[in-house]
Image (spheres, helix red, strand yellow):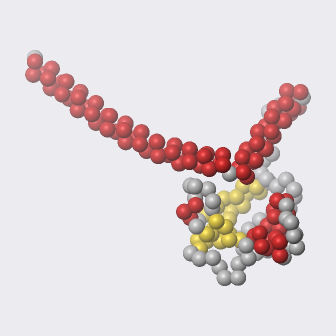
Amino acid sequence: MFKELVLTFSGLIVKDAVAQGLALRHQKATNRAVASLAEFRRWAIQDTHATSRSQFRRREKLVRTQRQLTNAVYRGIKEIPPVAITEIDLESLEVEPEGMIGHHDSVRGEAHFRFPRPINGIQWFRKQAAKTKVVLRFVDARNCNIGLVLADFTKCDWGGVYLYMYVYVRM
């Protein structure tokens, strides 16, 4: 009887040790995934474009909820669905291509904006991307190790002011 109790308790101790080891392994994997998400959020908080985009989305959501409260017609409408789904292939580049002109230099030189505003840069990018290939560099912490990539946006439809478009990126 005493021997069976000792065997049962030792079996429970071994089972608990194995379960604790597996739980620790799963906890470490979860912490790694959460750490990369937290690192991206820290980067997004410090990035001016990401913060302005999130502030715009908050204002947009507030306006939508206020409209829903005042008028029953607008209740249940979430967002405008995308009008197009486009796939973009990215080619990895080792070095910067010869003869490439930087965006800032192109806006000031070719577009003849001596003191460009942000909207001038966006409009010039849309105009140039519609007819030439674009070299991109990821700046966020999660993807910055990818380096330079060559993207072909010539098949994208850049028409319309409020163009909602999903872009699937394949590397």
* Left or right side of 14 for 138: right
Tell me where residue 110 sits by quadrant. bottom right
Question: Which residue is at 19% across, 24% downward?
Answer: 9
Query: Picture coordinates of residue 103 (x, y %)?
Result: 75, 70
Q: Quadrant of the N terminus?
A: top left
Question: Which residue is at 90% across, 29% downward?
Answer: 71
Direction front: furthest residue: 115
Tell me where residue 152 sits by quadrant. bottom right
Query: Picture coordinates of residue 78 (x, y %)?
Result: 78, 38
Q: Specify whether residue 89 is in view.
A: no
* Left or right side of 50 for 124: right
Direction top: furthest residue: 1
Query: Picture coordinates of residue 85 (x, y %)?
Result: 73, 57
Tell me where residue 158 sits by quadrant. bottom right
Q: Quadrant of the C terminus?
A: bottom right
Would you place residue 16 above or below residue 93 in this image? above
Would you place residue 2 above or below residue 28 in this image? above
Direction bottom: furthest residue: 98
Query: Residue 60 or 130: which is nearer the viewer?
Result: 60
Question: Which residue is at 66% across, 82% downward?
Answer: 98
* Left or right side of 21 for 54: right
Question: Which residue is at 86% across, 66% downward?
Answer: 115
Tally of numbered discs: 0
Query: Residue 94 or 20: which is nearer the viewer?
Result: 94
Would you place residue 124 above or below residue 100 in this image? above
Q: Specify whether residue 48 is in view.
A: yes
